[in-house]
Amino acid sequence: MQKFWIKVLIFFLIYSIGFSQAIKWEEKANKMVNEQIAIRGVTDPEVLAVLQKTPRHRFVPDKVSKYAYNDHPLPIGEGQTISQPYIVAFMTEMLDTDSNHKVLEIGTGSGYQAAVLSPLVNHVYTIEIVKSLANSADSTIKKLGYKNITVRWGDGYKGWPKEAPFDRIIGTAAPPEIPLALIEQLKPGGKMVLPVGTRWQEIVVVTKNASGEISKKNVLPVRFVPMVRQK
Ligand code: SAH
């Protein structure tokens, strides 16, 4: 009988620790949205809500998960990083998504940016050049129950011809110049947001009008990992 009560006690202890941690990450996400993102000028309520609801700590390695909601990028292995929360929010807002959009992401990394886009669009296709990162992002995404994200291991310079054209393209690694294949795979009326440059980089918003003409606007100086070419 005593054993039974000890088991009940242990059950409740574990349950309440789990519960308090669940509250903790939501509070941290709330603070992150208010103190890092909204304050810097991201105003789209849908973008702020999705940043609030996405469990960023589940996308980073365990040893850095306590820093997941801090105001900086974090290492995710293989020399790569998950972008600072504000940059993710800013680029998502710039992408100007709609619920019927087919989106291509270059540089899956942890899968966090794809997860942030998932509730805002119809489908996210995301390409990662490092196989181990593609695999672990895919398993995180499946574990968390995202149904409209497809991860592929491959070279983003080529885009995803089989699924093209895309309403929106987002790049999260910096090429020295905007890759031609990505411009080609953008729908007329489409938009692409990506960092461009080598040592000096800026986020560029590329728009393609109905007749296929391109215009570009530099919107923010940044520092991203380079978009590398397949060896
Ligand atoms: N969006 C990611 C952050 C990505 S960091 C996230 O939310 O976590 C940039 C990623 O781009 C790295 O994982 C890097 O391996 C990948 N990358 C670099 N060059 C690439 C290329 N040519 N094609 C696809 N992915 C590439």
Image (tube, helix red, strand yellow):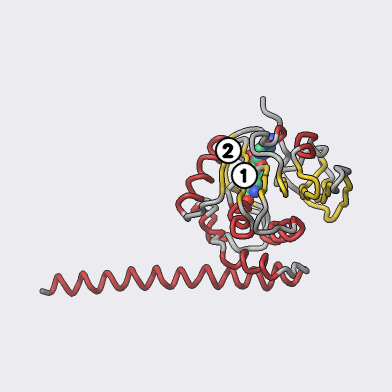
Using residue 11 as the reference point, say whether residue 53 is left or right of it.
right
The reply to whether the residue tagged 1 has its Cβ within 8 angstroms of ligand 1 is no
Q: Where residue 7 sits: x, y (%)?
A: 21, 69
Q: Is residue 223 above or below residue 154?
A: below
Query: Does 49 appear above or below 80?
Result: below
| Identity of the residue furthest to the front in this view | 211
Q: Residue at x 82, y 42 (%)?
A: 197
Q: In the picture, which quadrant includes the N terminus? A: bottom left
Label 2 vs label 1: CA separation?
A: 8 Å
Residue 229 x/y as whole percent: 71, 30
Q: Are marks 2 and 1 in contact (CB under 8 Å)?
A: yes
Residue corresponding to mark 2: 152
**Where residue 4 sits: x, y (%)?**
15, 71
Report which residue position mark 1 lands on.
125
**What SS does tag 1 mark?**
strand
Above or below for 217 versus 163: below
Q: Left or right? Give the position of 6 relative to 70.
A: left
Q: Is residue 97 above or below residue 26?
A: above
Task: Name the element at disc 2.
Answer: strand
Query: Residue 68, located in which quarter of the rendered image?
Result: bottom right
| Residue at left offset 66%, top offset 60% | 85
In the rendering, at what x and y percent does residue 39 appear?
74, 72
